[in-house]
Amino acid sequence: QVQVVESGGGLVQPGGSLRLSCAASGSISSINAMGWYRQAPGKQREMVAIISTSGRTNYADFVKGRFTISRDNAKNTVYLQMNSLKPEDTAVYYCYADLIRIGHYVPHNYWGQGTQVTVSS
């Protein structure tokens, strides 16, 4: 079994900051990319940021310069530092890990349950 668990969401005022964390655990052989997506009410899920095992990053244009993704490979954990938050950043943020389970050979994406981020005054 594999678990992907996010934490760190909450309510923050515009201009504020939050740090999301996501840890993958269980019968994991290796992890490739990890990343964050988000889904606002009535909208499709969209990519926020992705980070490779080597640390190469890819950001959506709407978060460039405000959000920073990082990871700790030893802890199978990915982080999302969100600064200068705007009301339009309000969404459920989902973490995923592209990983290979022990005894398997093909990578699959495993998703967390999501964490709510609300930006409001």
Image: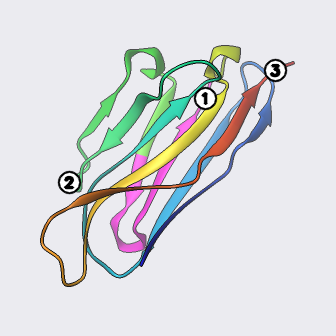
Q: Of the residues shown, which amino acid type is indicated by label 2?
A: Ser
**Coordinates of residue 29 in the picture (x, y in percent):** 24, 78
- Crowd tier of the residue under label 3, counting other residues whose Cα lies within 10 Å: few below 14, some 14–19, many 20 or above: some
Judging by the rendered image, the residue that carries numbered circle 2 is 54
Q: What segment is highlighted magenta in the picture?
A: 70-83
**Coordinates of residue 6 in the picture (x, y in percent):** 58, 56
Q: Secondary structure at mark 1?
A: loop
Residue positioned most to the front: 42
Quadrant in the picture for residue 60:
top left
Structural distance between the alpha carbons of marks 1 and 3: 14 Å
- Quadrant where the C terminus sits is top right
The mark total stands at: 3
Q: Of the residues shown, which amino acid type is indicated by label 3?
A: Ser
Quadrant in the picture for residue 75:
bottom left
Say whether residue 80 is magenta.
yes
Judging by the rendered image, the residue that carries numbered circle 1 is 83
Which labelled disc corresponds to residue 73?
none
Name the residue located 80 percent from the left edge and 35 percent from the top edge.
11
Quadrant in the picture for residue 39:
top right
Say whether residue 118 is magenta.
no
**Coordinates of residue 74 in the picture (x, y in percent):** 36, 73
Judging by the rendered image, the residue that carries numbered circle 3 is 120
Q: Secondary structure at mark 3?
A: loop
What secondary structure predominates along the stretch shown in magenta? strand
Name the residue located 62 percent from the left edge and 22 percent from the top edge.
89
